[in-house]
Amino acid sequence: MSFILYELAAADKNVRFSPHCWKIRMALAHKGIEAERKPWHFIEKDRLAFSSQGKVPVLTHDSNVISDSWKIASYLDKASPNTPLLFNNQESKTLALFVNQWADTVLLLPLARLIMQDIYSNIAPCDKDYFRKTREKKFGQKIEDISADREERVWEFRELLSPIREALENQPYLSGENPNYADYCIFGYFMWARSISDFQLLDLDDPINLWRDLLLNAFNGLARNSPHLS
């Protein structure tokens, strides 16, 4: 059975930086599934026409085409039920869905503001006009201004992480003694920043660093050893 994963790439095609793609990178590693990884750029929407939409991640598995990270994660457990599960039961899947939605709605924009200039500086030249037009429309500011006050705003992002700190007080992972997809939903955002930016998101003594280090080292250091620009 052949898996192919389409991922967002920077100017250096070895650097893959989408938070949603990183969720699936970790999910595939969790399940011990090897996938061919294909780089993709923002303007290459025609290359994803077979998926009837224009965003990554997209996973193909033989004749199956799945887009959207949540749908891909759900598919992986169905397609490969005899490998370690991303969702141990329906309750853990329901909780992971909440964590996924929380990350995508609460964390995404504040984090984007902190690393926007770094993203723009490091994406492929072919993507720059598209990225500038779409992000400046969304944020109502010039790219150069979106991250201009990030040293003052980073504390707001750190405050948003308070529920994560509290959840990790008595357990190593959000999911308990071992990680599952709920952890990867949050970790994907840290990999988004790590891959494309050298901005320090956390205080050095932040307990979240311990959790992040565990996941950086997971699966033989998959995330830690991944090419990045910081």
Image (cartoon, rainbow, N blue to C red):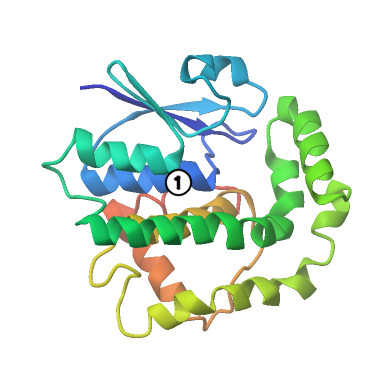
Image side of residue 95 versus residue 199, left or right = left
Percent position (x, y) of residue 9? 57, 34
Disc 1 crowd rating (10 Å Cα; few below 14, some 14-19, many 20+) is many
Percent position (x, y) of residue 38? 45, 25
Q: In which quarter of the image is the C terminus?
A: bottom right
Q: What element carries label 1?
A: helix
Q: Can you identify the residue that label 1 sits on?
A: 22
Q: State the image quarter where residue 105 is shown.
A: bottom right
Residue pictured at 83% horizontal, 44% vertical: 136
Residue that protrudes farthest toward the left in the picture: 82
Residue pictured at 37% horizontal, 85% vertical: 169
Percent position (x, y) of residue 181? 33, 55
Percent position (x, y) of residue 123? 68, 37
Say whether residue 226 is visible: no
Q: In which quarter of the image is the N terminus?
A: top left
Give 158 or 224, whichever is nearer the viewer.
Answer: 158
Q: Is residue 25 above or below residue 205?
A: above
Say whether residue 106 is visible: yes
Q: How many labels does the image show?
A: 1
Residue pictured at 61% horizontal, 36% vertical: 10
